[in-house]
Image: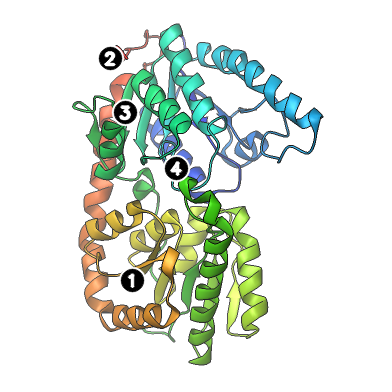
């Protein structure tokens, strides 16, 4: 009997714990639903993925300086040649599999800066190779957004059209793909995959008050705001620093959290500016680490989307410093729509007022989260049930999903 071959594609192992959390959620499902499957990944950090999650992994880009700013003709040439080489490498990788899955993440988003020849181009190559080689490519519970960049928009549209299966983590994502000209009438909306991850036990409410967890981010605007990136980054850092300083002045212990390796300079800048023993930073390498920190916190104030997801999942009252509509929608879906503050226009005084209002309403918020979390977990369970027919059983030919005409 042959084992089904499943390939996983995404920016895993590159320092973003939200991306890795989506990978873990799908791996957990595959190990239950298809325990005999041969699973490997094409990703940003293959060594990390293999070491942490126990699956073979290959590097996404042939040119090792892909994410480094071109410093001269050698880098420019390397990147150019790399794009051509990657087309053949990705096609060869796709061909080795019965199905390729892109699990969750904001793979179709432009809420943060990106170049068209980065992930949009790579995802297009995966989906195009899948169509040409008759290997279904499934975009499972992904996030998406519209963009003003024509190249990014075109590559995203064609990648989505060429995929054999599409589902989304929220209605905003499906609406964005529809607005780009993709027929989404048979596409379903479920929930973020990480809502199925194990949840640590809550903190001891009878003990001393817990810290305030503040999730910070290297925020410089979206892909369409590159010309304002420095200004937005300064304003965000100043606002969050003022907020943390105000909490410390009131004697509140603050625990700074990140969601990506690139966020660490932000925590260092806040620690240096506030200079208080009440303010510390946590070393978190996974969503599990984040959830453990948040489970013992009184309140969470979070910027990154998956920091927010972790807080809500463990049932800790959270305030979103929102940099994209997806955060606002998530909070609304959880019954906390009024607890949002814009990341682009942080007003430390207003943020402190909202924080105090959230704390006054803490008991009611915890009850709301206790009610909503099982609903989202059930949506993800239905997502995995819908995905199962795409996963060939051992010894069986793959049940190829619909291959729509672009």
Circle 4 SS class: loop
Residue 102's x, y, as percent? Answer: 43, 30
Badge 1: residue crowd in 10 Å (few <14, some 14–19, many ≥20)? many
**Residue drawn at (42%, 55%) of the image:** 305
| Distance between the alpha carbons at the discs numbered 1 and 4 | 28 Å
The residue that disc 2 covers is 402
Q: Residues within 10 Å of mark 3 (few under 14, many from 20)?
A: many
Q: Earlier in the sequence, mark 4 or mark 2?
A: 4
From the image, state whether disc 3 or disc 4 is nearer to you. 4
**Which circle's residue, 3 or 2, is located before the other in the chain?**
3
In contact (CB < 8 Å): disc 2 and disc 1: no
Give the quadrant of residue 181.
Answer: top left
Question: In terms of image quadrants, where is residue 32?
Answer: top left
Disc ID at residue 317: 1
Specify which label sits upstream in the sequence, 3 or 4.
4
Point out residue 59 in the picture as x, y percentages from the top left corner.
65, 29
Q: Earlier in the sequence, mark 2 or mark 1?
A: 1
x and y, in percent, of residue 52 in the image: 60, 42
Q: Which residue is mark 4?
A: 110
In the image: residue 47, left or right of residue 296 = right
Which type of secondary structure does the marked residue at label 1 adopt? loop
Whether pointer 1 and pointer 3 mark residues with C-beta atoms closer than 8 Å, the reply is: no
**Between discs 1 and 4, the one toward the N terminus:** 4
**95 or 63, which lies in front?**
63
Of discs 1 and 3, which sits in the foreground? 3
Mark pair 4, 2: CA separation: 27 Å
* Residue closest to the eye, 291 or 357: 357
Residue identifier under label 3 = 166
């Amino acid at each position: 009997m042959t084992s089904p071959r499943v390939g996983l594609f995404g920016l895993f192992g590159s320092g973003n714990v939200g991306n890795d959390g989506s990978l873990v959620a799908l791996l957990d499902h595959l190990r239950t639903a298809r325990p005999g499957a041969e699973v490997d990944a094409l990703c940003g950090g293959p060594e990390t993925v293999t070491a942490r999650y126990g699956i073979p992994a290959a590097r996404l880009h042939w040119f090792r300086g892909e994410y480094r700013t071109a410093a001269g003709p050698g880098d420019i040439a390397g990147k150019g040649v790399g794009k051509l080489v990657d087309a053949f490498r990705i096609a060869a990788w796709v061909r080795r599999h019965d199905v390729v899955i892109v699990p969750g993440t904001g793979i179709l988003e432009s809420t943060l800066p990106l170049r068209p020849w980065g992930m949009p181009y790579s995802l297009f190559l995966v989906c195009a190779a899948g169509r040409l080689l008759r290997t279904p490519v499934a975009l499972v519970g992904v996030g998406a957004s519209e963009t003003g960049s024509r190249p990014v928009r075109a590559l995203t549209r064609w990648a989505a059209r060429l995929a054999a299966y599409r589902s989304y983590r929220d209605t905003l994502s499906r609406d964005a793909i529809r607005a780009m000209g993709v027929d989404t009438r048979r596409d379903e909306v479920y929930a973020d995959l990480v809502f199925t991850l194990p949840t640590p036990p809550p903190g001891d409410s009878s003990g001393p008050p817990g810290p305030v967890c503040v999730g910070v981010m290297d925020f410089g605007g979206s892909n369409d705001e590159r010309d304002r990136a420095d200004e937005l980054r300064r304003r965000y850092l100043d606002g969050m620093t003022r907020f943390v300083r105000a909490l410390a002045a009131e004697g509140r212990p603050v625990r700074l959290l990140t969601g990506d390796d690139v966020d660490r300079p932000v925590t260092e800048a806040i620690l240096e500016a506030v200079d208080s023993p009440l303010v510390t930073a946590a070393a978190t390498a996974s969503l599990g680490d984040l959830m453990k920190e948040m489970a013992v916190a009184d309140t969470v104030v979070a910027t990154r989307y998956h920091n927010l997801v972790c807080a809500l999942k463990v049932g800790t009252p959270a305030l979103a410093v929102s940099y994209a509509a997806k955060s606002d929608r998530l909070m609304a879906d959880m019954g906390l729509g009024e607890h949002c503050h814009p990341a682009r226009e942080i007003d430390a005084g207003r943020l402190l007022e909202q924080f105090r209002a959230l704390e006054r309403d803490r008991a009611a918020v915890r009850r709301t989260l206790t009610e909503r979390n099982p609903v989202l977990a059930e949506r993800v369970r239905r997502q995995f049930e819908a995905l199962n027919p795409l996963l060939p059983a051992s010894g069986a030919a793959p049940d190829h999903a619909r291959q729509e005409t672009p």
